[in-house]
Amino acid sequence: MTAQELGQHIWSIKESIRGLYDDSEVEDVILPFTLLRRIDCVLESKREVIAKGLESVTDEKKRAYKLKSLMNKYHLPFYNHSGLSLQKLLASPLNLRDNFKVYLNGFTDNVKDILSNFVHEDSSSGSTDLSQIYARLDRSNKLFPVVEKFAQVDLSPEVVDNTMMGTIFEIVVRYSKEATNTKAGQFYTPREIVRLLVALTLSGKESELYQPGRIFSIYDPCCGTGGMLTEGKEYMKEISGMPNLRVNLYGQELNEKTYAICKSDLLMKGELQDFEDHVMQGNTLTDDKFAHKRFNFMLANPPFGMDWGDDYREVSRESTTGGRFEAGLPDKSDGSLLFLQHMISKMDEGSGSRIGIVLNGSPLFNGGAGSGWSNIRKMLLDRNLLDAIVALPKNLFYGTDISTYLWILDNNRPVERRSTVLFIDATYKEFVVPLQRSLGKKRFEISEEGTQEILRIYQEYVPLSRTIHDEETGKERSVEIAKILDYDDFLYTQVTIRRPMRLWYRDIPDQIRALLAEGTIPAPDAPKRQRKWDFFDQLLTLEGLEEQRSDYELFDYLKQQKVKYNKGNINDVRRLLGEVSESAPEVYTDPLDSSSPMLADTALNDTELIPFKVDICEYIREEVLPFRPDAWRDESQDKIGCEFPFTKIFYEYQPLRSIDEVLTDLKALESESDTSLDSFIRSLKQ
């Protein structure tokens, strides 16, 4: 049987529990039982010889050491002390429940760790309860038929090698996710996207694979079912032509069941023989299981739009200088750039590292100058890390149809690429092929030709145009699909533009009496009245305050009348008695000193986003002052911003259709509707 046929056969066992388990629960049976059956088949030829080797060893510590020695000798990453298997359990149907418990508890800790995560049990407690795997089946008299059906599936290494077993398990996992179409893409990235990301990430490093004795590492901080890790390793072996190339895989996954799937997959592929602690369960953002570790290659597809608000306290502790997130914190509604910063913190400054990450559109442009989003993007440029961004077509993922992008980072970029970024617009249908049937929201997959073309464009690293078929016009046209931009093209200065406050004062006595009546100014006999309000009582005694005066004229008049005032009085007068008017003269901080700074009217504040390559003073002189001659720049508020406006970069102006063309189409539609209506009326009369 082929891998596809075996995968379908295993998944068909779900028919035995139809009605007992919902579609979303079927994987709770099929996945762990698939793992158990593979382990049984691998142990079958070695079980007795290992048991015989342990017979004479009674001391617990020596027995553990001896077992480890025997497992290494026979290249086994696991063992079962019970001597039982699914096949042997069938020999005693009446004792199946009790024997199944003994069978599960007989596994080595690495297998029990995986099984405990399938049932959300804490394997670190020392007393893991694995009964959830079989108890429900036993209560419904379904345990025996399920065990029987799995025992009939031949997954022995002689028939199914590690690579084929990994493929079978991936097929079963995919079926389990497709069965519900519920956030399948959160845990499973389509294989053709993984392969494209891996190819882009490893591009340019092919020659290093031939260095004698070199050991490589691949890391995924949100590894899901482990597809990126295993695909990365297989691709490295493929392009190097060395099946024994040493590649260590590392990953961390938050979701317990997904972690169990990942570790099961790696275990069945033989990837955990020597590296048991290379895949860990936990929250990468708050509990980095690989602190201080550095990696050659890093791949990730972090959850789109993941809210990380609950982790804010722990994450913010590492947002200071030297922390993983020192560049800044994005909005709590999307933590994808936290994962990117985490990966950057694990780049090897000596031998160099490359990162490939799948992101949605938000990290390209969310957040203004000075925000966490913007500062993180700017950090990528400041450290010369960003190498390329590739836009993918929509409807490639199982759980979302939003726009997605592949970001490629490198901390040892070629000199000729320094301070530049390659943008590839691969959103056109020429890069994909339609699926025979949709899988959730996935309607297309990247074709092999599309993958190779995107990889070639990236490797050539030059601007490029190609011919595409325009679906709207039905014609062929040439479009730019690759552009190279300088880092400075993404930077801008957010400049704050101020305009002066302009005030008139008139009918001051009437205004003060109105303020007293409404309580804005406390009455003279009000308890605990502040002394500053005495100033307004004094104004009521002056004559001539009914006349209209500017700010300078008012305070000059008060000076002539020997009225003393302080800064607080000036602010209160302007706030309570001044009338904003474009026709009034400017207001100065010191009302009687025109050499003091002008007071800004905050209601007229504006900002200008000025490209980094444009002289700010010249921009203001040409774009601001002709329209607002009294405006000035507040340099203390300047902020540097950074965004990657992908859509704007590839925007192509399309002329509007002429009126004649539009009218012709409208007349054609009108004629069609009349014909259809006439036909409908005739059919009614028949």
Image (cartoon, rainbow, N blue to C red):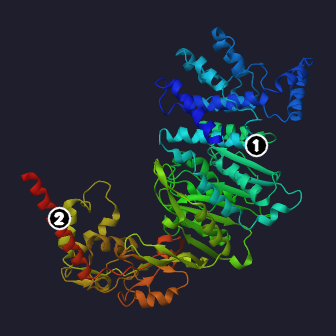
Q: Are marks 2 and 1 in contact (CB under 8 Å)?
A: no
| SS class, disc 1 | loop
Task: Give the answer, above or below, for where 28 lies relative to 401.
Answer: above
The residue that appears at 77% across and 31% down in the rendered structure is 42
Left or right, 470 with reference to 553: right
The residue that appears at 34% across and 66% down in the rendered structure is 532
Residue 506 in which image quadrant: bottom left
- Residue farthest to the front, as pictured: 686
For marks 2 and 1 on the same chain, the one whose residue lies earlier in the sequence: 1
Report the mark closest to the observer, 2 or 1. Answer: 2
The image shows residue 670 at horizontal and vertical percentages of 17, 69
The image shows residue 253 at horizontal and vertical percentages of 63, 43
Q: Residues within 10 Å of mark 2 (few under 14, many from 20)?
A: few
Q: Nearer the viewer, residue 366 or 212?
A: 212
User: Does any portion of residue 412 appear in the rendered image?
Assistant: yes
Q: Nearer the viewer, residue 103 or 301?
A: 103
Report the disc number at residue 673.
Answer: 2
Identity, as a three-letter code, of the amino acid under mark 1: Glu
Q: Nearer the viewer, residue 375 or 179?
A: 179
Task: Give the answer, above or below, for where 554 lies relative to 325.
Answer: below
Task: Give the answer, above or below, for where 473 lies relative to 531.
Answer: below
CA–CA distance in space, label 2 to label 1: 65 Å
Residue 671 in which image quadrant: bottom left
Q: To which residue does mark 1 refer? A: 271
Q: Residues within 10 Å of mark 1 (few under 14, many from 20)?
A: many
User: Does any portion of residue 645 appear in the rendered image?
Assistant: no
The image shows residue 650 at horizontal and vertical percentages of 49, 75
Identity, as a three-letter code, of the amino acid under mark 2: Ser
Report the disc number at residue 213.
Answer: none
Left or right, 60 with reference to 541: right
The residue that appears at 59% across and 19% down in the rendered structure is 145
